[in-house]
Image (cartoon, rainbow, N blue to C red):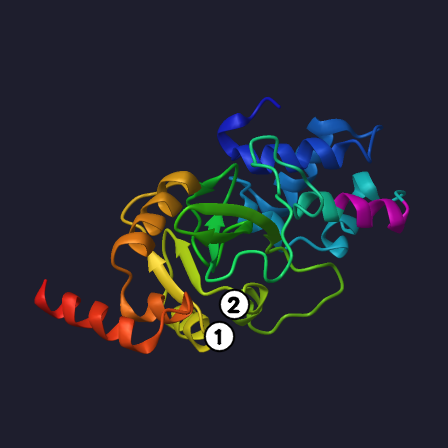
C-alpha cells in the first residue's frame, strides 16, 4: 500500500485480506475504491459500518458477484480477521473459576486496552481471579451485514452484558448509562495499556482490598464486604 498515512494498522490488515477475494482488482484497486467512497483517512470506525451496497456503487466492482462482495464487506468490517498479535483464547467452561470476575476490555489490536466505546473494533473478554486470568472470548463490534441497529451504543452494551467490568480509553455519558444499565461497571483508563498491565492491577485490588461492589461480584460474604467498606471510609 502506497498510502500508509491514510490507514491504521487494523484497517490495512482488513483491506489486505479483503483484496484476496478480488484478485483482479488487488489491494491498490480496492484501496482506491474505498477512498473514493469514504475519503481519507480510512479507519476501523469507517470500515465497521460498511455495507455491500457501498461496494456495489463502484464501477470497478459492478461486475463482481454479490456473494463475493459479501465476503469482501465482511473482511473489511473485521469479521473473521485474525490479529497475529492477539493472545490465544484459553478454554473455559461456566463454573471453572468460582469467585471470578468477567472483564471486557475495549481494544483495537493485539492485547491493547486502547479503545473508545463507540469505535473500538472488539472487546477482549477475560475471566479473572486474584491468581489467574484467561482470555475466553473476542467479540467483534462490527454490525453484521443485513442487521439493522437503531442504537449502536445499546448494541455494543448487549455484546458484553455478561461481563461485570469494562475497561476502556473513553466513553460518553449516554453510552455509560447504557453500559451501567446492563450491570457493567465501566472504568476509564488514564492512558492505554496492555491487558497484562490493566488486569494485573485489578488482580492486586481483588487480592488485597476489593471495593464493596467488586467484593459482591466475587461472592464475598456480606459481613466481609462491610469490613472492606469501613476500610475504604478510613482511607
Mark 1: few/some/many CA within 10 Å (<14, 14-19, 20+) = some
* Camera-side residue of 165 and 139: 165
Q: Main secondary structure of the magenta part?
A: helix
Residue drawn where x is 65% and y is 60% of the image: 143
Location of residue 157 with respect to 75 vertically, above or below:
below
Give percent across and percent down for residue 101: 46, 60
What segment is highlighted magenta in the picture? 65-72
Separation of disc 1 and disc 2 at Cα?
Answer: 7 Å
Location of residue 106 with respect to 101 vertically, above or below:
above
Give percent across and percent down for residue 219: 42, 69
Pointers 1 and 2 in contact (C-beta within 8 Å): yes
Residue drawn where x is 55% and y is 67% of the image: 162
Residue 66 magenta-highlighted: yes
Q: Which mark is residue 157?
A: 2
* Furthest-left residue in this view: 234
Quarter of the picture holding the C terminus: bottom left
- First in sequence, mark 1 or 2: give its number: 2
Location of residue 92 with respect to 172 vertically, above or below:
above
Amino acid at each position: 500500500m502506497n498510502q500508509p498515512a491514510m490507514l491504521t494498522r487494523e484497517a490495512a490488515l482488513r483491506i489486505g485480506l479483503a483484496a484476496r477475494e478480488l484478485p483482479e482488482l488487488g489491494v491498490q484497486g480496492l484501496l482506491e475504491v474505498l477512498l473514493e467512497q469514504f475519503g481519507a483517512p480510512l479507519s476501523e470506525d469507517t470500515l465497521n459500518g460498511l455495507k455491500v451496497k457501498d461496494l456495489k456503487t463502484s464501477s470497478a466492482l459492478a461486475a463482481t458477484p454479490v456473494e463475493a462482495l459479501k465476503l469482501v464487506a465482511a473482511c473489511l468490517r473485521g469479521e473473521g480477521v485474525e490479529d497475529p498479535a492477539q493472545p490465544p483464547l484459553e478454554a473455559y467452561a461456566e463454573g471453572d473459576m468460582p469467585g471470578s470476575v468477567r472483564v471486557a476490555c475495549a481494544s483495537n489490536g493485539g492485547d491493547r486496552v486502547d479503545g473508545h466505546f463507540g469505535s473500538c473494533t472488539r472487546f477482549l473478554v477475560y475471566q479473572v481471579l486474584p491468581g489467574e486470568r484467561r482470555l475466553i472470548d473476542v467479540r467483534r463490534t462490527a454490525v453484521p451485514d443485513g442487521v439493522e441497529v437503531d442504537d449502536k451504543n445499546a448494541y455494543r452494551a448487549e455484546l458484553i452484558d455478561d461481563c461485570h467490568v469494562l475497561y476502556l480509553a473513553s466513553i460518553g455519558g449516554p453510552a455509560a448509562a447504557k453500559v451501567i444499565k446492563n450491570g457493567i461497571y465501566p472504568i476509564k483508563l488514564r492512558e492505554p495499556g496492555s491487558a497484562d498491565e490493566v488486569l494485573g492491577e485489578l488482580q492486586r485490588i481483588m487480592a488485597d482490598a476489593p471495593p464493596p461492589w467488586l467484593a459482591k461480584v466475587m461472592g464475598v460474604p456480606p459481613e466481609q464486604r462491610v469490613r472492606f467498606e469501613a476500610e475504604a471510609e478510613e482511607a
